[in-house]
Amino acid sequence: MRLIAFFIKRLALVTALAIAFAGAAYGQGQGAGGAEGGQAGEAPAKLKIMTIERKPFAMVMNGKLVGFSVDLWDAMAQELGLAYDFEVATQFSDMLGRVEVQEADAAIANITITSAREQKMDFTQPIFDSGIQVLVRDEDGPAGLVGALFNWEMLGLIVLAGIILFIIANLMWFFERREQPYFQYPYKEGIWRSFWWALNVIVNGGFEERVPQTRRGRAFAVFLVIASLFLVSAFVAKITASLTVSELKAQIQSYRDLFNRRVGTTVGSTSASFLDFHSVPYRHFEKMDDVFKALEDGQLDAIVHDAPVLRYYANTSGRGQVRLVGSVLRPEKYGIALQAGSPYRERIDRILLKMREDGRYDEIYRRWFGRNP
């Protein structure tokens, strides 16, 4: 019995020591975990916010990034106590792609909320009501008429007509210089009289006076009368076509009016998707500045893109040169793109609602668009 009692006491002692050591180890583990928790509780790293130059949403002025999107995000970040850095993407797809693969926390610009994008990332509630519209060169009034009539193509036709008349004048003077008194002058004087005669035949389609006397002259004159019917008709048709095209540019009311026109937009935009859906042919560009330049240079007849971007350009750099036509082809709404499952979505939505209620959103909107939302 004494032996059994001895072993029981020893077993109790060993058990107590084991429990004591386990408690100490657990305490050290908790201390380490507490240290890690303290590190996790430190201020989070700066958020990486993507954007792209789309005036007036984001643009670089005097070496500083400014714009509606920049000011809106800055106001929200201050309210939420978030530190951040902006990064400007060169392509729209790259901006959204960085958020999709979680290399950036958010993207803010003229980003349209679509079902396809919603499958890859989260969006806040809409921050801007937008839509797709059309921009054309402003060719109304006398300046537009002059531009339609006296372009490089028309100038080339006039020069060509002058050369043809000069050749006709030389031939007629050569045929009639000895028989018809009207042409019986030295070359320097006779060629201009002959030029006037040829112009009169082409325009009027005949001749009643100064009838050629030689066979060659008469045969050539008959040929000119017949040819004048086609030459004058072609010239008038060209002028009519130029005026018609100039007028039609101002009559774009729907996507159906875009067919048979040189249309441009940016690659990967919702405008490009809209044109693809309706099978409207178009040229795509990487940058908006390139699209605007193509329109100014006459390489495009119309630009299809986001209405606020087009309106800002028409009121600033393109004032007096371009104008918006028709109504909005398709309404759209912009949102802030976030990583899928982002913990910031609900917080941003709440502050957006608050900013709309207290007037701060309207103040930022007026700052960049000159009017109330």
Image (cartoon, rainbow, N blue to C red):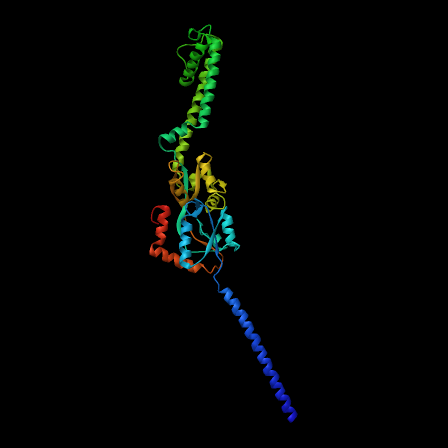
Residue shown at 36%/53% (left/top)? 361
Relative to 322, say whether 210 is above or below: above
Left or right: where does residue 362 sit relative to residue 65?
A: left
Image quarter of residue 79: bottom left
User: Does the image show residue 92?
Assistant: yes
Determine which quarter of the picture holds residue 144: top left
Near-viewer residue (239 or 294): 294
Q: Where is residue 84 in the image (x, y as percent from the top left)?
A: 46, 55
Q: Residue furthest right?
A: 3
Residue 91 image offset from top left, x and y in percent: 50, 46
Query: Of 64 and 217, which appears nearest the observer?
Result: 64
Q: Which residue is drawn at 46% across and 43% down?
A: 275
Residue 334 location, x and y as percent? Answer: 42, 51
Give the residue drawn at x 42%, y 32%: 245
Q: Position of residue 360 (x, y in %)?
A: 35, 54
Vertical position of residue 96 compared to residue 243: above or below: below
Give the quarter of the figure containing the N terminus: bottom right
Residue 230 appears anywhere in the view: no
How many numbered discs? 0
Task: State left or right for residue 235 relative to residue 11.
Answer: left
Please, is residue 195 above or below residue 103 in the view? above
Q: Compared to 206, does 20 lie above or below?
A: below
